[in-house]
Image (cartoon, helix red, strand yellow):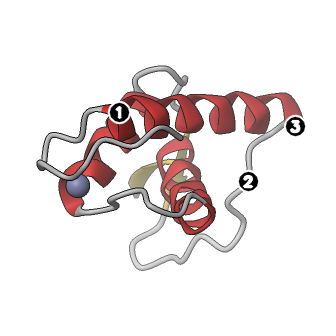
Amino acid sequence: MGVTNVTAEVVAREYRSLRDKLTGFCGCETCKGDVLVYALNRLSPHYVSTRQGEILTELSLATDQEKAKLDVALLDGFRKVGLAPRCGAKPLQL
Ligand SMILES: [Zn+2]
């Protein structure tokens, strides 16, 4: 049995969909990591046990409220990282 943090999986998925909408955001590995860390440090982890090799098809959070919190944390991260990208990209007001 392995352990998967569903919050981290959903954050990674939402990151990709939000980044596509936020044109101009750098999105390099450094900026991506900074946004994910920012968001995950503000959210509660939600663990599930997984069998080896199992593919998680049902990656969803329990409530709409949790989803809303997750999106807020991610957008805050995008704004903060966009204003001062550590990679040296041009600062961006989102
Ligand atoms: Zn960058």
| Quarter of the rendering occupied by the N terminus | bottom left
Residue drawn at x 53%, y 48% is 11
Task: Name the front one of labels 2 and 1.
Answer: 1
Near mark 1 (Cα within 10 A), the count class, few <14, some 14-19 or many ≥20, is some
Residue drawn at x 47%, y 46% is 8
Cα separation, mark 2 vs mark 1, equals: 30 Å
- Residue 72: image quadrant is top right
Q: Is residue 46 visible?
A: no
Q: Would residue 91 be found to the left or right of residue 94 on screen?
A: left
Circle 1 sits on which residue?
83
Label ID, residue 60: 2
**Quadrant for ligand 1?**
bottom left
Q: Is residue 75 visible?
A: yes
Q: Residue 22, image x and y in percent? A: 56, 57
Task: Name the front one of labels 3 and 2.
Answer: 3
Near mark 2 (Cα within 10 A), the count class, few <14, some 14-19 or many ≥20, is some
Q: Residue 46, image x and y in percent? A: 57, 35
Mark 2 residue CB less than 8 A from any atom of ligand 1: no
Q: Is residue 60 above or below residue 16?
A: above
Residue drawn at x 51%, y 55% is 9
Near mark 3 (Cα within 10 A), the count class, few <14, some 14-19 or many ≥20, is few
